[in-house]
Image: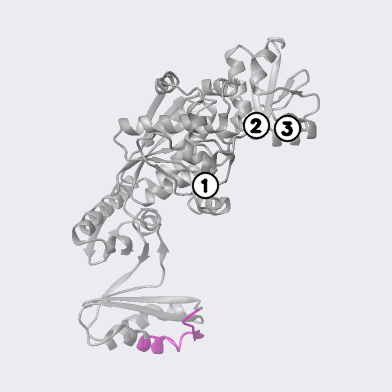
């Protein structure tokens, strides 16, 4: 038997609490059914008891369900008196505390002739002869007794859950999600607050960046989205690279974010969603200054939620690791393509003068593929695309360095040519169509986009990153 605890749900009024309990049970049950675990629940005030045919598997699932504060495997006993209770608990706990420093923690619900402190004291005295000592502050082992009327639940393990509110209790949002670290953590944070979260991904080098993103999204959904099968909107934004590096935009890094906001708002309004979620953290990159963030909100009909706004990058990375959301590998962030001369303090008036018109947004809206989270594996299987990542660089290969000129001068692969992305079309006219081309940039996203564009022109192009090229020398 498992004892499931919640915290914040217990602070709600009777009606809201009952509704949230039912939603929590439904989300747990859906996750257990998906894992083919037979189960049944018993509800008591402030507690849920779960009996299943796979206790270990149930713990692993339940501790990932939003709304669950913690879960413990417990043993249930009936008792007739305080002495009888402590006698039962002594038999249960004596092997566990043997040779260790321990403490007893008990809580009591109902009418009894004894207090929780009485249980702590008497049981502690009984267990002392097996243990090496008692410590209230730094025990090696804690044993727990939960008394509910004439039943006692004994346990010594507590597995923490994510806490928060049950998924689906606080409406639907649309999240701008990339293949990086921040936006999946932002989505997770709002899911923890009970929001059903759909995702918008703008692809600049499909299928390479799309598939990398989907593999990361799959982890978030499979681990934490029990109770909701999110929509994933994949926007083909390859044309934006040409648009934003054409010289027509004065503030391409902020304009790019504005385009993302407008896309997310259109999608959110179509879905009757209540807001937009982003992974922005104040001052973390050039587009995330207070001035730029204020300008980005200009004229939006929906609120923008930024759950990471006050967090350090180290804090975000720690959450990502703890929750199993770290990307296995990445091509880098979108914004790196448009930040060669980043604008730090763009006003609303300056941003509104950028050539972001209805035609551009409608064009992007017309290039959206929408799938459900449950269909990611099927989508990946049928949309693998060509393997465009470079292997060994053979003799005669044209190697192109897409990084900034100063980085190229600091180090570059021997014999490589320095070409800026905006000059790629002109450069391609000077290359023998039969040549093999390997392009590299800092992380891989820029070179993946460039390789994809050259392939469409008929070139045998591949992409890689700076680290790989350094290792190959």
- Number of marks in the rendered image: 3
Tell us which disc is closer to us: 1 or 3: 1
Q: Residue furthest right?
A: 414
Is label 1 in a helix, a strand or a loop? loop
Residue drawn at (68%, 28%) of the image: 440
Tell us which disc is closer to us: 2 or 3: 2
Dots 1, 3 in contact, CB < 8 A: no
Q: To which residue does mark 3 refer?
A: 469
State the quadrant of the C terminus. Answer: top right
**What whole-number distance in Å separates the C-alpha atoms at marks 2 and 1?**
20 Å
The image shows residue 462 at horizontal and vertical percentages of 64, 23
Which residue is more in the foreground, 192 or 362? 362
Residue 378 visible in the snapshot: no
The numbered mark, 1 or 3, whose residue comes first in the sequence reads: 1
Q: Is residue 134 highlighted in magenta?
A: yes
User: Magenta region: which residues?
Assistant: 121-137
Q: Residues within 10 Å of mark 2 (few under 14, many from 20)?
A: few
Residue drawn at (25%, 61%) of the image: 12
**What whole-number distance in Å separates the C-alpha atoms at marks 2 and 3?**
22 Å
Q: Residues within 10 Å of mark 3 (few under 14, many from 20)?
A: some
Direction from residue 333 to residue 142 in the image, left or right: left
The relative height of residue 320 versus residue 129 in the rendered view (above or below) is above
Residue 399 picture quarter: top right
Q: Which mark is residue 281?
A: 1
State the quadrant of the N terminus. Answer: bottom left
The numbered mark, 2 or 3, whose residue comes first in the sequence reads: 2
Q: Residue furthest front?
A: 349
Q: Which mark is residue 340?
A: 2
């Amino acid at each position: 038997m498992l004892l499931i605890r919640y915290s914040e749900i217990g602070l709600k009024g009777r009606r809201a609490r009952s509704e949230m309990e039912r939603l929590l049970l439904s989300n747990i049950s859906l996750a257990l059914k998906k894992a083919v675990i037979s189960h049944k629940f018993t509800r008591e005030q402030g507690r849920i008891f779960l009996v299943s045919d796979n206790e270990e598997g149930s713990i692993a699932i339940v501790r990932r369900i939003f709304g669950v504060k913690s879960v413990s495997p417990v043993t249930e006993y009936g008792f007739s008196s305080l002495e009888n209770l402590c006698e039962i608990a002594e038999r249960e706990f004596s092997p566990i505390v043997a040779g260790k420093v321990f403490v007893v923690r008990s809580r009591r619900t109902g009418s009894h002739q004894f207090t929780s402190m009485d249980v702590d004291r008497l049981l502690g005295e009984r267990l002392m002869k097996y243990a090496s000592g008692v410590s209230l502050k730094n025990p090696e082992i804690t044993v727990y007794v939960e008394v509910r009327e004439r039943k006692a639940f004994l346990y010594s393990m507590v597995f923490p859950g994510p806490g928060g509110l049950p998924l689906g209790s606080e409406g639907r949002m649309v999240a701008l999600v990339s293949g990086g670290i921040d936006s999946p953590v932002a989505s997770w944070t709002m899911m923890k607050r009970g929001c059903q979260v759909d995702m918008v991904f703008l692809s600049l080098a499909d299928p390479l960046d799309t598939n990398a993103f989907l593999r990361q999204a799959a982890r978030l959904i499979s681990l934490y989205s029990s109770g909701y099968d999110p929509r994933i909107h994949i926007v083909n934004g390859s044309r934006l690279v040409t648009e934003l590096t054409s010289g027509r935009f004065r503030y391409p890094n902020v304009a790019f974010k504005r385009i993302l906001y407008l896309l997310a708002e259109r999608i959110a309004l179509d879905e009757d969603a209540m807001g937009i979620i982003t992974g922005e953290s104040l001052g973390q990159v050039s587009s995330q200054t207070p001035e730029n963030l204020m300008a980005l909100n200009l004229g939006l009909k929906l609120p923008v939620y930024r759950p990471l706004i006050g967090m350090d990058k180290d804090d975000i990375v720690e959450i990502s690791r703890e929750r199993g959301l770290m990307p296995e590998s990445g091509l880098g962030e979108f914004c790196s393509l448009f930040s060669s001369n980043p604008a730090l303090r763009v006003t609303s008036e300056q941003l509104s003068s950028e050539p972001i018109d209805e035609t551009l947004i409608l064009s992007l809206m017309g290039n959206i593929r929408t799938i459900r989270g449950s269909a990611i594996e099927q989508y990946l299987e049928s949309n693998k695309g060509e393997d465009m990542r470079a292997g060994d660089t053979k003799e005669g290969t044209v190697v192109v360095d897409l990084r900034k000129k100063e980085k190229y001068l600091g180090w570059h692969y021997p014999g490589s040519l320095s070409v800026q992305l905006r000059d790629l079309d002109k450069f391609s006219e000077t290359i023998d169509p039969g040549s093999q081309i390997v392009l590299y940039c800092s992380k891989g996203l820029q070179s993946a986009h460039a390789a994809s564009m050259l392939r469409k022109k008929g070139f045998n192009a591949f992409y890689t990153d700076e680290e790989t090229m350094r290792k190959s020398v």
